[in-house]
Amino acid sequence: MADIRASVLIPVKNGGPLLGQVLEAVLAQQAPWPFEVIVVDSGSSDGSVELARRYGVRVEVIAPADFGHGRTRNQLASMAAGEFLVFITQDARPASPQWLANMVRGCDAGPDVAGAFGPHRAHPEARHVTHCELNQHFAGFGSALAVVRLDDTARFATDTGYRQWLHFFSSNNACIRRSVWQKLPLPEVAFAEDQTWALRAIEAGYAKAFVPDAVVYHSHDFGVWETLQRNFDEARSFHLYFGYRIQASLIGALKSAAHLARRDLGWLRSGGLRGWRLFKNAGYMACIELARVLGQYLGTCHDRLPTWLLGSVSRDEKLQRVGTA
């Protein structure tokens, strides 16, 4: 166990066939040192436990009620032997056999680097707009290994964009140095445990790394209602844990929806759509963007919503109730 350099840690709940693809890609990693793979399943009913065990990885089972985004990842970390704790999800498939080695190399880029994260690329079958959006988002972190830390406290206090850029982190594709995790475990929050952790690490004086060649395929083509729910959860968490008001006014939200719909129209045209297909897809994406900003608006105003509505619009709470990941 002392020779294990990295532990790949995967929370699972009804992972479906994609879980097998993820495990195959993880076990095919070409690392110059030993690594282990640990799965914690929180109540799958689709055979995910049996599937994971057939791949020979360590599998532990917990009750669905015991799952928490931060809590379960901390439980995985407590089982791990590796110096580096590498977190992915059941639907985040490493894009190359060098993914793990690249991720650990990034996390070990300096003694003060607390964690590293890599880009997400859309699954090949994802819609064109999803490909464009993920590519644009992660391009903002650069094309070379980058280590960043809090070096402008005045800007950090006043510039929300700079603050968000510093604490962006994704436990769908990330690595945390074990020695740092022992001091700063992932917070047990309802959502955004990864960015909440990163903010605490940055404020504590640690650095983080972006590793552009540690890529996973991870994307979701949510429908209209799921998009609203997902963005509700995110906006509510950002308000609770960071103080951000992503969409503070309904008028501003509608303007944002119009801007995003125009952006999507341009991407669809660049993807070669014309005529009826362009009209149909642009109309659908306009509905998706409207759902996105309405979810953000409701999440920002969560403290003024009735309890019955809160239970309906939170996707994360529903998934934990019904037992899907």
Image: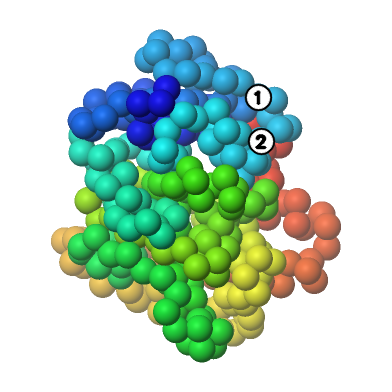
Nearest the eye: 251 or 72 = 72
The structure residue drawn at horizontal position 59% and vertical position 50%, both measured from the top left corner, is 183
Of mark 1 and mark 2, the one earlier in the sequence is 1
> Is 105 above or below relative to 43?
below
Task: Give whichever of 209, 277 is nearer the camera.
Answer: 209
Q: Mark 2 = which residue?
A: 67
Residue sitting at x 35%, y 33%: 5
- Seen at 41% across and 26% down, the residue is 2
Nearer to us in this view, 38 or 289: 38
Look at the image and tell me in which quarter the N terminus lies.
top left
Per the image, the residue denoted by label 1 is: 62
- The amino acid pointed to by label 2 is Phe
Residue sitting at x 18%, y 66%: 270
In this view, the residue in front, 117 or 36, is 36
Residue 225: % across, % down: 57, 53
Residue 156, visible in the rendered structure: yes
Is there CB contact under 8 Å for labels 1 and 2?
Answer: yes
Q: Is residue 218 above or below residue 75?
A: below
The image quadrant that residue 6 belongs to is top left
